[in-house]
Amino acid sequence: MELTGTILRGPTLEPVEGRLVIGEDGRIDAIEETTVESDDIVLPAFVNAHTHLGDSIAKDAGGGLTLEELVAPPDGLKHQLLRAASPEELIAGIATSLEYMEQGGTAACYDFREGGVEGVSYLREAANGLAIDTFAFARESVEAMAAGDGFGASGANDDEFAAERAATRAAGKPFAIHAGEADPSDLDPALDLEPDFLIHVVHPEDRHLERIDDQDVPVVVCPRSNLVTGVGVPPVETLLERTTVALGTDNVMLNSPSMFREMAVLAKLTDVPAREILRMATVNGAGLLDLEYGVLEVGAVGRVLLLDGESPNLDGVQDPVRAVVRRAGMADVKRVCFAD
């Protein structure tokens, strides 16, 4: 398979005109710099580093509610709606969100899974037949973690999670935890658990930033979600000075699982350069789980997104990286290539 246009090559997403070749084994065989006639933009497929796909049954429910009223376990609106839904409804809702993400060039998502062992099975069933990779970070029990791909803790103020952390270590699986979303009170106990990565970190204090740096703990930010729930905007520039930062779309109840929209909002809220935001949505997210894609380089798995450089939205673009982050959307997707 050959794709031509402006290729956003390597971990720095350097724009080069040329041809990208994917071999029969699904890996990138070559990236050739050469003059081509195509104006298309070739970039690594996105990695959505934090989702709650169960919420797909309740899109835009709970307007005006506080963060706690919306999502706090066990009786936030989200949890009430999840309990009331049938397995068939939950699976169908998750499947629609996965299909939407795949159509928009998302190659993988890291989903915090409610519902225990059954919740993990719902994600597996919903993803059956789709090309998008799904990683289930189970939330309720060690048994669910064993059935899934890791453990996703709700927050250190909700429980101690020491047993779950020990179990993930023994199983060789990642442990992630929400922290610092509404206030800084749960950041220290979350960092005490030595997580593989943190979610949100909207309200870190200096000592938390030092610990994040010292412990080399990556952070996944979800700015649109934070805006909807009114908790603020994460200090992304400061976090980037300390650690790896990836990007997620969070609850489908609150926002569409669109990486295009997430990038555009972050670009317009902050002074983070477009290239760094695109790295957050691709290279950095993939690096959290050591995926073999998320970057266009020889030998990487060829999970690639092709944007139509002649679409009415992208025609005439001068800066392809900035255009991908701030301008592009679903309508500009020309092809999604998900080799395995």
Image (tube, rainbow, N blue to C red):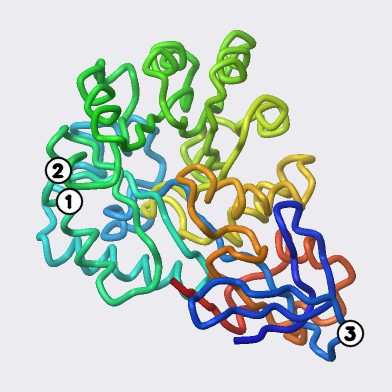
Residue 183 vs residue 298: left or right?
A: left
Q: Residue beneath label 3, please?
A: 35
Which corner quadrant holds the C terminus? bottom left
Give the Cα distance between marks 3 and 1: 50 Å
Q: Which residue is rendered at x = 18% and y = 49% of the image?
A: 82
Which corner quadrant holds the N terminus? bottom right
In front: label 3 or label 1:
3
Q: Residue beneath label 1, please?
A: 119
Q: Secondary structure at mark 3?
A: loop
Tell me: residue 250, above or below residue 65.
Answer: below
Q: Which residue is rendered at x = 55% and y = 60% of the image?
A: 46
3 or 1: tag closer to the N-terminus: 3
Q: Amino acid at mark 1?
A: Gly
Viewer-proximal residue, 112 or 83? Answer: 112
Q: Secondary structure at mark 1?
A: helix
Residue 209 vs residue 273: left or right?
A: left
Occupied quadrant, residue 171: top left
Residue 116 badge: 2
Q: Farthest residue in the top direction?
A: 207
Whether label 1 touches label 2, CB < 8 Å? yes
